[in-house]
Amino acid sequence: MIDRDAARVARLAAWAAEHGRDVAELAIAWLASQPGVGPVIAGATRPEQAQANAAAADWTLTANDVDHVGAIARRERVP
């Protein structure tokens, strides 16, 4: 199970990197794109984490991006 989860996170990280972002920014942007989700509150223990969290607010995923990331997260074939 851990190996599959690590592989999934690696695929998500690669997708984020292709878009000039990191996986933490992707997680925040994806959550913010979900219907019915209010503000996304993410903790930070270091200044660079707070900066990355703030940067995620500038990333609006397209509907295609949301579908693509969701498929990776669910281990489905990517559309």
Image (cartoon, grey):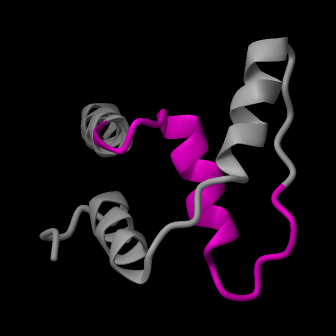
Is the C terminus in the top left, top right, bottom left or bottom right quadrant?
bottom left
Residue at 26% across / 31% down in the picture?
A: 3
Using residue 14 as the reference point, say whether residue 48 is left or right of it: right
Q: Residue 31 falls in which quadrant of the image?
A: bottom right
Counting from the top left corner in percent of width and height, residue 16 is at: 38, 42
The quarter of the picture where residue 11 lies is top left
- In the image, 25: left or right of 70? right
Residue 2 position within the rendered picture, expressed as x and y whole percent measured from the top left: 35, 33
As drawn, 43 above or below 36: above
Q: Foreground residue, 28 or 6?
A: 28
Residue lying at 76% horizontally and 87% vertically, measured from the top left? 36
Please provide the residue range marked out in magenta: 18-40
Indicate whether residue 25 is drawn in magenta: yes
Q: Position of residue 68 (x, y in %)?
A: 29, 69
Q: Is residue 24 left or right of residue 76?
A: right
Q: Is 49 one of the magenta-colored residues? A: no
